[in-house]
Image (tube, grey):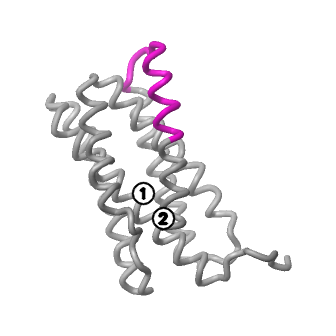
Amino acid sequence: MEPLPGDLKREQLLDQVIRVNHAGEYGAKRIYTGQMLILKSLEDQEMLKIMADQEAQHLDYFDKEMQRRKVRPSLLLPMWNIMGYALGVGTALLGKTSAMVCTEAVEEVIDEHYQSQLKEELLPKDITKNIEKFRQEELEHHDIAKNNRGELNAGHKMLYKAIKLGCKISIGLAKRF
């Protein structure tokens, strides 16, 4: 298919994919760090540690790709640091259900984001292979959160929608900055 005016070239697309995924995985790591600070039960700590460790592996992969391919990080990384941590702490302070609603919403958006990247024909096979692996792990996180959140009230449903919107905005910003 012939590229349209404004379409990214292969290298530009690859840089953008690596940059935005790195920023997202960094933000996810900070969310789990914040949640682990507040949710102290052994069961919660074990569950969150498993997900946090996988996010750390995803982040490490994209960090290495950034170095290998000389891709600049998102200029908004300091903001993702603070906002991710605040989101993790804030939702956990509202209770386990709110923390799990946060995880469920974030992981749903990430699944959609990774699915859209997997449709890109210009990405190298090694990148798409890892994106698919990470997408499957993000889906596991989504399901863990959904199975551990309990019943949702109106406030939880609003929180869910707000977090999804915030994630979509964050992805758009990370693509540009």
Disc 2 target residue: 20
For the stretch drawn in magenta, what is the main secondary structure?
helix
What residue range appears in magenta?
A: 148-165
Asked whether disc 1 touches disc 2, contact meaning CB atoms under 8 Å apart, the reply is yes
Residue 7 is marked as: none
Q: What residue type is labelled 2?
A: Val
Mark 1 crowd level (few <14, some 14–19, many ≥20, 10 Å Cα): many
Residue 24 is marked as: 1
Is the residue 164 above or below the residue 60 in the image?
above
Is the residue 5 above or below the residue 119 in the image?
below
* 162 is within the stretch colored magenta: yes
Kindly indicate the quadrant of the structure image that contains residue 119: bottom right
In this picture, residue 53 sits left or right of residue 123: left
Is the residue 46 above or below the residue 173 in the image?
above
Kindly indicate the quadrant of the structure image that contains residue 99: top left
Q: Which amino acid does label 1 sit on?
A: Gly
Badge 1 marks a residue whose secondary structure is helix
Residue at point 28%, 23% (across, down):
94
On the image, the x and y values in percent for residue 80 come to 34, 55
On the image, the x and y values in percent for residue 151 come to 43, 14
